[in-house]
Image (tube, rainbow, N blue to C red):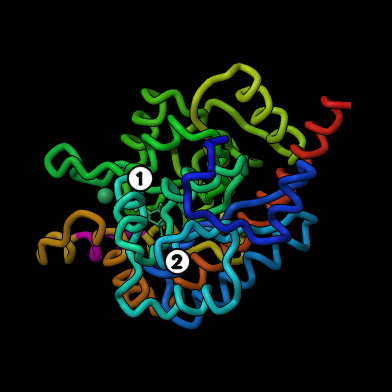
Amino acid sequence: MTDQRQLPIDVKADVAAALERQGPVVALETTVIAHGLPYPLNRDTARALEAAVRAAGAVPATLGVVEGRIKIGLDEDQIEHFARNDGSCRKLSRRDIPVVLAERGDGATTVAGTMILASLVGIPIMATGGIGGVHRGAETTMDISADLTELARSPVAVVCAGAKAVLDLEKTLEYLETQGVPVVGYGTDRLPAFYVRETRHELEARVDTPEAAAALIDAKRRLGLAGGLVIANPIPHEHALDADFAERAIAAALAEAEARGIAGKDVTPFLLSRMEKLTEGKSVAANAALIRNNAGVAARIAVAYAGLRSGQSS
Ligand code: PSU
Ligand code: MN
């Protein structure tokens, strides 16, 4: 844990109490709220994620930066502010966090940003929709999400529905292998791709229970290896999109992004909002459902992990 005396950081009371007793805490990202989903579905999803974590017996910590202060846990008004994002709320990946603190601005954390803030206070697990990764055409654009390098640095397990389907999944897995990041299927042998339950990409490891996932996180910690891991949890059957339908919409959205010259941090928000139109809202409904599912699984893993750690210390 970093020395926090120099940092403008506020830890919500219930989160602080849980961390104090080494109880289960799940960090939740906010880029998906501020930049990923439309209002008011984003606000309702943020609330539903916290409820899903609580229902599984863990404490949720929705992370972000408000007026230059790091918030480990947001209150209702702050979540509403992020959800209504009037454009003043930055998207915070690693490079952006010092900037928003110095500016005393507001920012919502990506997976990379969430991992950084979570590890400041020792939260070992987070939930998201899908991680960023290597974009299609990265061999010319060099668009590779800082989520991937963060996974090699910060000790946080990321429960997700695989990588965003708009990415080049093969290159994303290659990159994670190079960076030494375990990618583990949760109840699956193949990489899920966000809207669809599985792809042709076989994974090297699989766990079927929260306890098995917790044992893996613990093994990595004991080895002293830097970085986190990816726990890839397929979207529930009833919310999955047809693979061909999803792929056609992705191809159309990507072509449009290229034609309009969308680049950098705007690529993902642009694609997600185009996908919403192209699928007549089915993509956002699926997105909200899979994140809720991931929050519940992350909480069950956090409970198992806290149990394991308390067994070790007694
Ligand atoms: N997946 C979603 N919605 C999102 C994101 C992922 O369904 O909004 C966000 C996550 O916060 C992820 C980020 O960390 O996109 C990656 O952005 P970039 O590719 O610019 O690093
Ligand atoms: Mn990018």
Q: Quadrant of residue 46?
A: bottom right
Task: Name the residue furthest right.
Answer: 314
Q: Residue at x 31, y 35 (%)?
A: 171
Q: Nearer the viewer, residue 53 or 294?
A: 53
Magenta-colored span:
247-254
Give the quarter of the figure containing the N terminus. top right
Q: How many marks?
A: 2
Residue 303 appearing in the image: no
**Earlier-in-chain disc, 2 versus 1:** 2
Q: Quadrant of residue 206?
A: top right
Q: Residue at x 53, y 43 (%)?
A: 4
Above or below residue 26? Residue 149 is: above
Three-letter amino acid code at the position of disc 1: Arg
Q: Which residue is mark 2?
A: 66
Three-letter amino acid code at the position of disc 2: Val
User: Helix, strand, or loop for circle 1?
Assistant: helix
Q: Residue at x 69, y 50 (%)?
A: 25
Closer mark to the observer between disc 2 and disc 1: 2
Residue 82, percent from left and from top: 45, 73
Is 252 magenta? The answer is yes
In the shown orientation, is residue 136 left or right of residue 46? left
Above or below residue 242? Residue 203 is: above
Give the quarter of the figure containing the C terminus. top right
Residue 15, percent from left and from top: 69, 55
Residue 57, percent from left and from top: 80, 56
Above or below residue 260? Residue 183 is: above
